[in-house]
Amino acid sequence: MVVDPETRYARRGEAHIAYQLSGAGELDVVSVSTWFSHLEGRWELPGFAHYLGRLASFARVLSFDKLGIGLSDPIPASSVPPLEEWVEDVRVVMDAAGVERAAIIGASEGALLAILFAAVYPERTGALVLINGTARLAAADDYPIGLPPDACAQMSELFASTWGRPDGMATLNPSIAADDAALATWTHFLRLAASPGTAAAVIKTLFELDVRSLLPTVRVPTLVVHRSDTPVPPISHGRYLAEQIEGARFVEVPGRDYSVVVGDGDALLDPVEEFLIGARSTGSANRALATLLFADIVSSTVHLAELGDRRWRQLLELEEGVVARLLSRHGGRLVNSAGDGIFATFDGPARAVGFALALREAVRAIGLSLRVGIHVGEVERTRDQVAGLAVHIASRISSTADPGQILVSRTVRDLAVGAPIQFTACGSHTLRGVPEQWELYSVES
């Protein structure tokens, strides 16, 4: 086992993301750990060192500290990045380490990030492993297995008021609750991982995250391993993951600890090693999750009649220049433009909303008004085009929007948690040609 390998840094814009490589072999594994990590401090924890060493015995293991955590650049405690930005941490460390395709392992709440990465980047995901994972921690009307509101509030308060003390670790990991030495080592590790303010902000965000709608879009071989008696998340969360991801294999193992590196780690890793050594991707890399945006100029025919062909063409040319500049700034890709409308894709919903807000203001400045619709869904990519039901849904949402309104689906709202975006519920809508009722939300500037 390689202990305490060299820490390196990948760049994501101006930010630095710390990562380490350990082990050797033909199989590449990306370890998406729980939110609170410290690449160098974890080697002081026997259970963590064993966990990483076990993975490194059959694979090359890439691990990292998320932005704002551990050795990566800090973030203001009041502005936790949305999940889509932390997904970019996975991509940039893979690029920096020369890892083109890997098995993605998401442990505990790290499963949320692993699921999103597998859905957005299936071509870079050879397999997906979720250990003690969840798609949503908190309960909802259609998700009774989640933690009730009072339990979420109690856990948030526990960690916010006792960060740097053993209370939280003892509550979530019964096997070390009476082991003062182990708790002291763990609380030191957590202090290295995050400040109290950052910890409180991250924990609040974790209870708001929800990736349930993405589970049917995961098209890679998937293993779900869950301890039978872990308090958070309970095993029902693991069963839910396996039921919602097509073809997923579910393995229940004994144990009652939340942390995958506390207790019997080999019981968790035995099925993981067996699965990964033989796992082969059968999913189509042409199908992937995408954020889809449609925008069109309101009453374009009226504007054309008022301005005349020449002036109208000048306005459209100006609009096209604004679109190209803003797409570049927000990481979007223009799929199609048809005179007075555009269709673009983005890697994440917060980027798409940021683009829409900026475009709305820019277009207002030249006397025009837009209606915008945004949706996140699975699409089929063929060369420069994308197709699928999700495209039609985004288009229908756009046509439902009022002049000047940015209207989004519930999936967009759920995945944009952590971004500084305010949504207002607009009720359930029927979208022409699309089954079921759709909950839509308006973006407030």
Image (cartoon, rainbow, N blue to C red):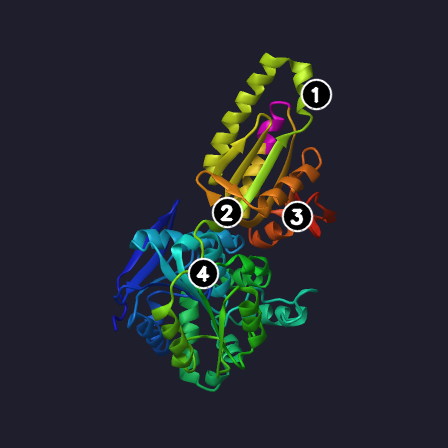
Q: CA distance from mark 2 to mark 4?
A: 15 Å
Choose top left, top right, bottom left or bottom right for residue 158.
bottom right
Answer yes or no: do the residues labelled 3 and 4 have beta carbons within 8 Å?
Answer: no
User: Badge 4, how many Cα within 10 Å: few under 14, some, many 20+?
Assistant: many
- Report the disc number at residue 98: none
Task: Give amino acid for label 3.
Answer: Phe
Q: Amino acid at mark 1?
A: Val
- Which residue matches tag 3? 423
Q: Residues within 10 Å of mark 3 (few under 14, many from 20)?
A: some
Above or below, 294 against 53 in this view is above
Taking the image as shown, residue 185 lies to the left or right of residue 433, namely: left
Q: Which of the two marks, 3 or 4, is nearer to us in this view?
A: 4
- The disc, 3 or 1, on the residue closer to the chain's N-terminal end is 1
For mark 3, give the secondary structure: strand
Q: Which residue is mark 4?
A: 220
Mark 1 = which residue? 302
Magenta stretch, main secondary structure, is helix
Q: Is disc 2 in contact with disc 1, using a CB cutoff of under 8 Å?
A: no
Magenta span:
360-367
